[in-house]
Image: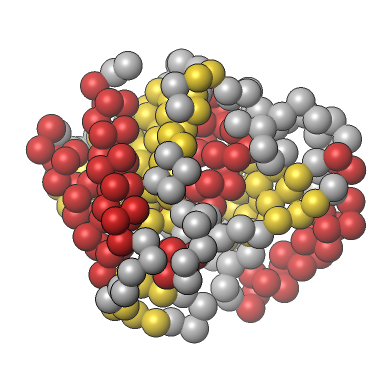
Amino acid sequence: MSDYLHAAIEAAQAAGGLLRANFGVALTVDENLAHDIKLELDKRSQTLIESLLLARYPDHAIYGEEGIRGDQSSEYQWIIDPIDGTVNFFYGIAHFAVSIALRREGKILVGVIYDPLRDELWACEAGHPATLNGLPMRVSERTALGECMISVGVSKTLDSVQASLPLFTRMVTSAKKCRMMGSASLDIAYVACGRLDAYIEGQISLWDIAAGLLLVESAGGKVDLQPHATLPDKYAIVATSGNVDLGIS
């Protein structure tokens, strides 16, 4: 295990411990938006991760959902989602995760996703097998769409919803089951370990999926990531096992 991967795992597990300790208790809401919630705990979790990573690598950059820190001119950039699935967390739904990736000059070197309630840790470094709790994992071998589990994420804007409805309808009627679970990082981690066969989202932020990109590809899957046509820092993603034809272009 590289020092980078060890640092990412340590930070993810530390943040996960913070989230476990605060799950199901009264929380401070910083912003209660129409379709989202921002918690004080989001910031506290990212601050904890930042402090651990920058203590080891003070010349690195931090790019997270809760802001940036460090040397933004650095070739090394840590990409952080301190609570992916904040709305789930706030409502007491046990489906959320911490996501940490390290990128150097556009290439993901390390990816870690940690589900603190299930104590499941997905981890990978470039050029090495992806693991779940230390054991090698592979994407699903299912080939028939009618036997597949698909996750289709839908963003909150009206344009995104309208654009996603035809795809969602196709997946609901063609796949074994179609899910929308509220944590993009866990969706893509589930593709990497074979629980899901595909994760599709038309408008997602990099911190939600950066770690998962490496996990899926290292586990034998395929990822198509495209910059959003009109929104900076947003992406369209199709992450699959590579073994099933979704019938989409």
Q: Quadrant of residue 121?
A: top left
Q: Quadrant of residue 219?
A: top right
Q: Is residue 146 left or right of residue 124?
A: right
Which quarter of the figure is the N terminus placed in? top left
Q: Quadrant of residue 109?
A: top left
Q: Is residue 188 visible?
A: yes
For the point 80% across and 48% down, which residue is it?
Answer: 248
Say how many tags the image has: 0
Image location of residue 186, percent across then percent down: 53, 46
Display colour scheme? secondary structure
Q: Is residue 105 visible?
A: no
Image location of residue 142, percent across then percent down: 80, 30
For the point 36% across and 38% down, which residue is it?
Answer: 101
Q: Is residue 42 left or right of residue 226?
A: left
For the point 85% across and 48% down, which residue is it?
Answer: 175
Image location of residue 108, percent across then percent down: 41, 32
Above/below status of 212 relative to 50: above
Q: Is residue 12 left or right of residue 113?
A: left
Above/below status of 133 relative to 195: above
For the point 31% across and 74% down, which residue is it?
Answer: 26
Image location of residue 220, percent across then percent down: 63, 23
